[in-house]
Image (spheres, helix red, strand yellow):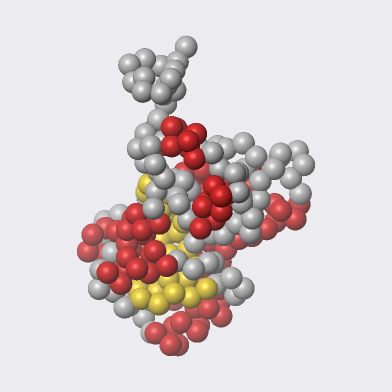
Amino acid sequence: MAHIAARTGSPAVVRALLAAGSDVRATTASRSPHAAHRSSENQYGRIMAHALGSIRRRLGLAGPSETFSDADWDTSIGVMQTGVFLCSQVVGRHMLERGRGTIVNTSSMNAWEAFPMRLAYCAAKAAVVAMTQVLAIEWADRGIRVNAVAPGVTRTALVQKGIDDGVIDVAAYRARTPMHRFAEPDEIARVVLFLACDEDSSFVTGTTLCADGGWSAMGWIYKEEGDTASPAR
């Protein structure tokens, strides 16, 4: 059984797990991770994997740091940082009782790659990396693996809305990404599947796997399109 506790739906992750032969259920933990876990455990029994997604009620809760409101900060941190902590804590307790389990959290390439106007988002995603590492070393010798995935720009429904609304400059993002495209949700789901699978990643814990098409490795600015010979001056 692979169980996914998420702040929002994880259809791509569910599809990937089903394709791998897992018996998978998804539970939305948007209000109470305690209640969501009790419900799923009572209905489905043993929990093997827990993947935590994140939401942004609008495109990024973004804005200048000097005017970013307390309410937007609290919302961002509450969903993307405190939500990871609470779900990991609740599910982790039950995994510890059983002596086995796997947690896969959702961070972002923005844990390392700072975007302007995204202070709360970047801070929360960096915190997910740190929490993943702390939990991994605390629980490593108790049968629990804790990892995270850090996606790059992914063509989710929210990103597509940003494209449609003219908020996201597709050409600029593609130019900055060495693979010159966005990730598809199923590609990120397969990374989660790898980290959740004891057969494939049994010796992996405390790791945040960045799936960003080479964005974070890129230290090069092209002078013009197609120039691969020298950096801009």
Residue lying at the far left in this picture: please name it: 199
The reply, left or right, for residue 168 in relation to residue 63 is: left
Q: Nearer the viewer, residue 121 or 229?
A: 229
Q: Is residue 61 visible?
A: yes
Residue 53 horizontal/vertical position (percent): 49, 61
Residue lying at the far bottom in this picture: please name it: 42
Residue 178 horizontal/vertical position (percent): 37, 34
Quadrant of the image containing the N terminus: bottom left
Give the quarter of the image for residue 18. Answer: bottom left
Residue lying at the far top in this picture: please name it: 233
Residue 35 horizontal/vertical position (percent): 56, 80
Residue 113 horizontal/vertical position (percent): 50, 37
Q: Is residue 139 visible?
A: no
The reply, left or right, for residue 5 in relation to residue 35 is: left
Counting the numbered discs, the total is: 0
Q: Nearer the viewer, residue 122 or 10?
A: 10
Q: Is residue 110 above or below residue 59?
A: above
Give the quarter of the image for residue 226. Answer: top left
The reply, left or right, for residue 140 in relation to residue 171 is: left
Residue at 50% x, 84% y is: 39
Residue at 71% x, 53% y is: 72
Residue at 43% x, 20% y is: 224
Residue at 41% x, 23% y is: 225
Give the quarter of the image for residue 24. Answer: bottom left
